[in-house]
Image (cartoon, helix red, strand yellow):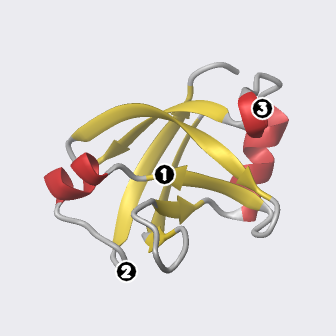
Amino acid sequence: MQITFDAELYPWDANSSWVFVTLSVDDSDAIDDATSMTGGFGSVKVDVQIGDTQWSTSLFPSKELGAYVLPIKKAVRSAEGIDVGMTATITIELVHV
């Protein structure tokens, strides 16, 4: 399963160096329907691409948002010239379905 979406980057909290994007509720529901393979904390392994940068990571469920969140590493943000407050086009592919 592959999903491409646009999302704004935001810090996890005001003092955090962790940066995330949130998937839509519809995309999150589709991921839940497509996989029974979750790891710790309900995480789902994915391959990700933003621009020319590809990497592997996990989506994490956010009870507060009712959707999955995706961490965006500093190396990726630097390589792609994106940062907090900017919108990126992101493609994810589930690793284990």
Q: Nearer the viewer, mark 3 or mark 1?
A: 1
**The residue under label 3 is which amino acid type?**
Ala
Determine whether the residue tagged by mark 1 lies in a helix, strand or loop.
strand
Q: Residue at x 67, y 63 (%)?
A: 24
Mark 3 touching mark 1, by CB under 8 A?
no
Q: Nearer the viewer, mark 3 or mark 2?
A: 2
Marked residue nearer the N-terminal end (1 or 2): 1
Q: Tell me the crowding category of disc 3: few under 14, some 14 to 19, or many 20 or more residues within 10 angstroms, Cα based.
A: few
- Between the C-alphas of marks 3 and 1, the distance is 21 Å
Marked residue nearer the N-terminal end (3 or 1): 3
Camera-nearest residue between 26 and 82: 82
Question: Which residue is identified by label 1?
Answer: 71
**The residue under label 1 is which amino acid type?**
Pro
Question: Which residue is identified by label 3?
Answer: 34
Residue 46, percent across and down?
54, 32
Residue 10, percent across and down?
46, 73
Count of all numbered marks drawn on residues in the image: 3
Determine whether the residue tagged by mark 2 lies in a helix, strand or loop.
loop
Camera-nearest residue between 18 and 35: 18
Give the label on residue 85, or none: 2
- Between the C-alphas of marks 3 and 2, the distance is 30 Å
Displayed quadrant of residue 65: bottom right
**The residue under label 2 is which amino acid type?**
Gly
Q: Residue at x 40, y 53 (%)?
A: 72
Quadrant placement of the C terminus: top right
Quadrant placement of the N terminus: top right
Mark 3 touching mark 2, by CB under 8 A?
no
Residue 42, percent across and down?
77, 37
